[in-house]
Amino acid sequence: MRIFTASVIIAALSLGTPAFVQAQGTAPSQPEAQTPPDQSSAVIRSIQIVDVKDLKPAVRSKVNDIVSQTSDEDMQSLRKSIDANPQVAAALKAKGLNSSHVVAINVADGVLTMFTKTA
């Protein structure tokens, strides 16, 4: 699953440029990375940045489970991909964050949700 998750992360970040950046305090109910039906047509239209501490306990638990199963290599790969995408990095910077704060992502329906931890 780790390799699959890393592949989805890298593919999602390299597939498209978001048309706009949007930071919201709500999160989708499934924080796991998901593969779009046809990756070649997937475009990230918006970006959400959610602090893990703001999630409902059940969702927070799912995110923490994913994080605990993610290897250091996969996390480094994710963070390099984030840093390589100017729009994604700018969305984090606008919230006073950087890629080192990102612990998981979710891609669904053109929305890239980045889950962060600040402390």
Image: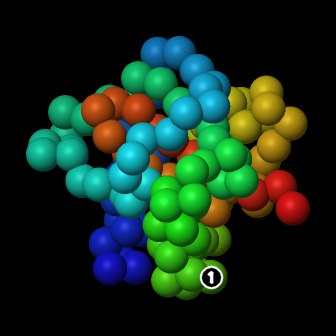
How many labels sit on residues?
1
Q: For the point 41% across and 32% down, which residue is it?
A: 111
| Above or below, 76 relative to 43 | below
| Above or below, 37 relative to 64 | above
Q: Which residue reaches farthest top?
A: 20
Q: Horizontal placement of 52 versus 66: left or right?
A: right
| Above or below, 105 relative to 89 | below
x, y percent for residue 67: 56, 73
| Above or below, 79 relative to 70 | above
Q: For the point 58% across and 21% down, which residue is it?
A: 21
Residue assigned mark 1: 72
Q: Horizontal placement of 78 versus 3: left or right?
A: right
Local crowd size for mark 1, using a 10 Å CA cut-off: few (<14), some (14–19), many (≥20)? few
Which amino acid type is shown beneath numbered disc 1?
Asp
Q: Quadrant of the C terminus?
A: bottom right
Q: Horizontal placement of 109 versus 97: left or right?
A: left
* Viewer-closest of 42 and 53: 53
x, y percent for residue 72: 62, 82
Residue 83 in sight from this viewpoint: no
Residue 101 in sight from this viewpoint: yes
Q: Which residue reaches farthest left?
A: 37
Q: Quadrant of residue 78?
A: bottom right
Q: For the point 60% across and 49% down, which residue is it?
A: 55
Q: For the point 47% across and 25% down, which residue is it?
A: 46
The image's colour scheme reads rainbow
x, y percent for residue 39: 21, 45
Q: Secondary structure at mark 1?
A: helix
x, y percent for residue 7: 36, 65
